[in-house]
Image (tube, helix red, strand yellow):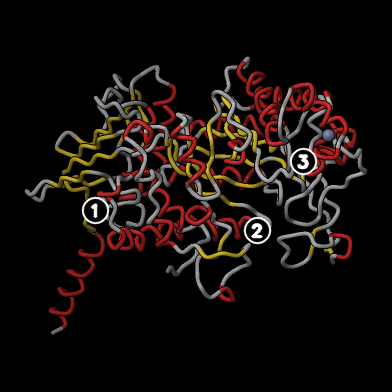
Amino acid sequence: MIKQILILSLAAFCLNTAAEINYQVIPMPQQIDINKDGKYMVLSKGMTVGYPSGNLQMKRNAEFAAEYLGLNVIEEGKKKADVNLMTGLKSSNPDAYVITIGQKGIMIQGASESGVFYGIQTLRKSIMNETGEIRLPYAVVSGEPRFTYRGTELDCARHFFPVSFIKKFIDILALHGINRFHWHLTDDQGWRFEVKALPELAEKASVRPCTIIGKNVGLSNPDNAIYDDTPETGYYTQEEMRDIVAYAAERYITIIPEIDLPGHMIAALSVYPELGCTGGPYKVWGVWGVADDVLCAGNPKTLEFLKTVYGELCDVFPSKLIHIGGDESPRVRWKSCPKCQAKMKELNLSNEAQLQTYINKEMEAFLATKGRQIIGWDETLEGGLSENAAVMSWRGYDGGKAAAKLHHQVVMTPTNNCYFDYYQLKNRDAQPLGIGGYLPLSKVYSMEPVPSDLTKEEAKYIMGAQCNLWTEYMLSPDHVEYMLLPRLAAMSEVQWLKPEEKNYEQFLERLATFKQSYQRLGYKFCTSHE
Ligand SMILES: [Zn+2]
């Protein structure tokens, strides 16, 4: 009897420790062919990772692989490695990868260095929750993303988050195969980007003396609002941002910085009131919403100011795309401002929307001299797009559709599928504060970034999709993580998989395992989903 129990528990122990790895992770690889002969390789400490000598990116990839899989790094040529990393995979998609596990060990091959990185991530996720002996069945596993632009936005203006968290955030993006971090650095409620030529922006415009208490999405009467008088402060030095850019680049993530113009500029106006149509005074806003006060389009100093700011922005961020905002900029001040009206007359413009286009064109020309391209929110369509502008479609899909028809590049980020400041469960009391709305996991997963009525040619202009974290009501890193996860997992499959490759039921099964990984990595997340 005792003997039987012993045998049974030993069997159970063996089952527990020798887990079947099935390579089904998020985002799901397009192809998983597991050998039927039952052969496997045991991954053990002391095994080595090799990479092509002289390739620094591959060296970094090898270090990641060693860290994730618990192995040692060696250079190629010195000794045959157990895990071999290489480029040269024939594919038109630079992010494509193939993992081969067999008698000769593991080979992770990418169409480029980024593809190798994604292969490493897939292998990492396949084994992350294993505690005993790791047996990797002989297999060929391959994957490639559907879209070239796979973005996530974080607003660090409404609330400031420290460098340590920004790096953790980038790690989370890397785990999900995201390759663009759209960094919202300035707004009415705080300026977070150090401009060396204009030190008052970092020193003063980064300080919000007070924040409205409770819910506020408009500003019926800001003067009578009740405020929390704890100041919200903080900005990123250029040195810190350069460090973050490098940290992201190692993980194949490009940071697209945003300085929102001509609206969402009250923090800047608080130190340079002469750049506003009325001349102020202004103070860094303690309420949330859309302000009537914006940059004066008729004051030549405005463009001077913007060129100084964006000049330094380009020094720090190597990204080709530079985000100029352009959203929620009321034209009411421009209508009654003599300078703005004189500018319109001089340029022979028939409405104020065209005045915004004039600024965009000036910025486009300026940024083009630095080899950059502008991207703006879909309001930038209203006065006519400047020549090479890309469009970020947030008010639904129509703006993006219109831009694609005009052959402008588009990133789809409609509120209904992509605004992660919305609640993820119906029961609001069970969750931390959100801005409103309802965006459950299933609705994120159901997103189709390419509108069906675009022609094949027009559809090519949809670069990809992006989810956004506006942080009016997210005061802490924990809260940001909670809003992001697990919805980012759903977004990841929107960005990586074609519609026919998606399967929500199967995704949920994989998500159950992925959530254990979140736990293991110390990430906060919403444990239930709808
Ligand atoms: Zn003006």
Q: CA distance from mark 3 to mark 2?
A: 21 Å
Q: Which residue is mark 3?
A: 265
Q: Relative to the observer, which residue lies in front, 158 or 376?
A: 376
Q: Residues within 10 Å of mark 3 (few under 14, many from 20)?
A: many
- Which residue carries the number 1 mark? 21
Q: Position of residue 342 (x, y in %)?
A: 83, 27
Look at label 2 and name its amino acid. Answer: Met
Q: How many residues crowd around disc 1 within 10 Å: few (fewer than 14), some, or many (20 or more)?
A: some
Position in image of residue 71 (x %, y %): 35, 39
| Ligand 1 positioned in quadrant | top right
Callout 1 touching callout 3 (CB < 8 Å)? no
* Residue depicted at 57% across the width and 70% down the height: 431
Is the C terminus in the top left, top right, bottom left or bottom right quadrant? bottom left
Q: Residue 64, located in which quarter of the rendered image?
A: top left
Q: Are marks 3 and 2 in contact (CB under 8 Å)?
A: no
Under circle 2, the secondary element is loop
Spatial CA span between label 1 and label 2: 37 Å
Q: Quadrant of residue 343?
A: top right
Image quadrant where residue 314 sits: top right
The amino acid marked with disc number 3 is Met
Disc 1 and disc 3: Cα gap in Å? 52 Å
Sequence-wise, the earlier of marks 1 and 3 is: 1
Type of residue at label 1? Ile
The residue pinned by badge 2 equals: 474
- Between disc 3 and disc 2, whose residue precedes? 3
Seen in the picture, residue 73 relative to 315 is either above or below; the reply is below
Place of residue 310 in the rendered image (x, y in percent of width and height, measured from the top left): 70, 26
Residue that lies at the very extreme toward the top in this rendered image: 369
Of 45 and 88, the residue lying toward us: 88
